[in-house]
């Protein structure tokens, strides 16, 4: 988990939701029954065990705009997924 300039973002909240409709179309219907939540560590990393299929990955972190992306996992190998968050325009100005 990094910002647009490459700085690490610790303590980001990640929610993973299995997209059963997309997975069933391609017969990748291993899936998960409930959403999985986790938090990125001090290095901005997180790890989850997921089966093949389509997933919606939603990420939030303080001072950053929320990010949501659909991801398809094929097979059971370890995958690296890089997420870059943008600073929220609402919180990017400092006032004296």
Image (cartoon, rainbow, N blue to C red):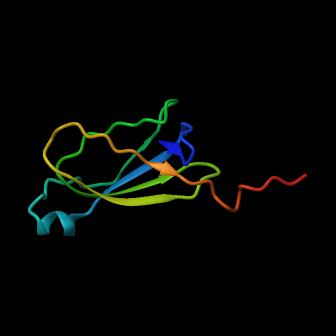
- Near-viewer residue (3 or 51): 3
Residue for point 70% across, 62% down: 90
Q: Is residue 79 left or right of residue 90?
A: left
Residue for point 47% across, 42% down: 1
Across and down, in percent, residue 59 comes to 47, 52
- Which residue ends up furthest to the right in the rendered image? 96
Across and down, in percent, residue 80 comes to 31, 40
Does residue 56 lie above or below 74 as drawn?
below
Does residue 89 lie above or below 15 as drawn?
below
Across and down, in percent, residue 95 comes to 86, 54
Residue for point 49% across, 47% down: 13
Picture quadrant of residue 93: bottom right
Does residue 23 lie above or below 45 as drawn?
below
Q: Is residue 38 left or right of residue 26?
A: right
Across and down, in percent, residue 29 comes to 13, 58
- Which residue ends up furthest to the top in the rendered image? 42
């Amino acid at each position: 988990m990094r910002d647009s300039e490459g700085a690490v973002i610790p303590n980001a909240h990640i929610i993973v939701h299995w997209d059963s409709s997309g997975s069933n179309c391609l017969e990748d219907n291993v899936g998960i029954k409930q959403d999985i939540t986790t938090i990125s560590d001090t290095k901005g990393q997180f790890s989850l065990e997921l089966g093949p299929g389509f997933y919606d990955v939603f990420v939030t972190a303080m001072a950053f705009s929320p990010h949501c992306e659909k991801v398809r996992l094929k097979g059971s190998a370890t995958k690296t997924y890089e997420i870059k968050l943008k600073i929220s325009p609402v919180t990017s100005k400092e006032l004296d």
